Amino acid sequence: MPDAGKLNLRILWDGKTVYGVEVKSTRPPAYRLLPGRSPDEAVQLIPLLYGVCGKAQRAAALAAVSSAQGRDVPQLEELEQGVLCEAMQEHLWRLLLDWPKLLGFPLPEAQFVRWHAALNALATGHGDAENLLAELHRALLGMTAEEWRRVDTQAKLFECLKAGDGLLAPILKALEYREIHLDFAGEQAQGDFLPRWTASDVSRNLAAQLGGAFAALPQLDGKPLETGALARTRHMPLLRDALRRAPTGLLARLIARLVDLLDSVSARGRIGHDGRGLSVVQTARGMLLHHVRIESGRVAEYWIVAPTEWNFHPQGALTGLIGLREGNAARLMETAQLFVLSLDPCVEFEIEVIHA
Amino acid sequence: MCLAIPARIEELIVPCNAIVDLGGVRKEISLALVEDVVVGDYVIVHVGYALQKLDQEEALRTLELFAEMGALAELRAELGESAT
């Protein structure tokens, strides 16, 4: 049977406190199927293999191959529009289906289906982006875009949400409540974030490490970094305030996703390359890297670093669970699910609590 | 990263669900995000929803790739190499 693999999180727990986490991946490195094929074939196969975020994967493949061949990326504007719409669909999926389900709220499925279809249309140049964004502000937050832009602290966010009837108000409130009641032994340290690098920055900063082993366990100077909406937005006053209140970042990641969704008016700059076969695409989950080396018209080397590799690194953000004081295994499992969903894995995830 | 194994629609369930065969495992999914799907079509499934309809040729080609990948993984395991 074909296997897309999964991620597994083992939480080591002594009955009172979490003292370790182990993250394992059984996902096959599908990019190993590409060497030996023509560059065009690689570009065709990648979106078939990675169908869930197919637009971003295809754009990254086209940009990497074009870059290695010294050509401009064809139809860049259309590709960027597609990548943006796909990222907005992914954010809506988390916000409207996954978070309500995990926190025990009804799923606004009908609205989700309608907006998903509207974004499919926008990806192909149909529909009105401004109208859709105005509708999303109203429905999700009960605010106008103007009101949302003025929200610069967490307190102001909840004050504005209280005044409206946004779909996400109860979700945000419930997550805030869960997060402030988490009890940690010692100070919670905030993790490190991947800067918003261009492809040339990636080449310059990671050149010595880039390769297959790096693709499986990416890090910078020995440190795993978080990528995604929070990494992109953490300097904004609202997110700085949310992270200061709760360095675990559960609510901050959810707010960051919302910012990423609602402030993504421009699709420009989501796709870049270094002119030597390395491409970078900004997806909903964070930075997607592709690298190709072409020799005699064939792919000689290909590897992909997906955001999930950064965010679910064994020494990465999930180690934030270490030190959590929780005496109830079922509640510990629920908290672990909040951590995992906040980091948004792109594959199936299993959690086990190991009581030693 | 999000690999997508094509799933074949085996049975339609009113109003908008379906049973799919995903590598030999039968699973109920929602068809709310796709249009005009009939029994025998292949779709990409993501967290319980059919995300996209594939044409038959694409789907079969993708399944072949996954089979090839499975064979590669087994070979590497036999040779004692890491699967990652």
Image (spheres, helix red, strand yellow):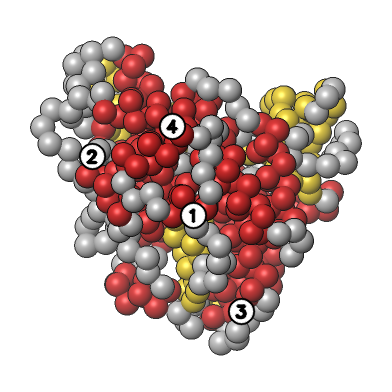
Q: Secondary structure at mark 1?
A: helix
| Residue name at image x 83 percent, y 51 percent | B55
Pick the residue in front: A155 or A210: A155
Counting residues from the start of the chain, the first of labels 2 and 4 encountered is 4
Q: Say which of marks 3 and 4 sits in front.
A: 4
Q: Quadrant of residue A193?
A: bottom left
Mark whose residue sits in front, 1 or 2: 1
Q: Position of residue B73 (x, y in %)?
A: 53, 46
Q: In this rendering, do the residues under marks 2 and 4 share a single chain? A: yes
The numbered disc on residue A162 is 4
Mark found first going from the N terminus, 3 or 4 = 3
Q: Name which residue type carries label 1.
A: Glu
Q: CA distance from mark 3 to mark 2?
A: 43 Å
Quarter of the figure that contains the C terminus of chain A: top left
Instruction: Give the class, few, some or many, for how many residues have Cα within 10 Å of label 3's Cα (few <14, many ≥20).
Output: some
Q: Is residue A165 visible?
A: yes
Q: Quickly name the residue at label 2.
A: A245
- What is the residue that sits farthest to the bottom in this orientation? A70
Residue picked out by circle 3: A73
Question: Is residue A242 found left or right of A134 in the rendered image?
Answer: left
The numbered mark 2 sits on a residue in which chain? A
> Is disc 4 placed on a helix, strand or loop?
helix
On the image, numbered disc 1 is attached to which residue? A146
Chain hosting mark 4: A
**SS at circle 2:** helix
Residue contact at pointers 2 and 4, CB within 8 angstroms: no
Q: Residue A58 or A3: which is nearer the viewer?
A: A58
Q: Could you tell me if residue A301 is visible in this image?
A: no
Q: Which numbered disc, 3 or 2, marks the residue closer to the eye? A: 2
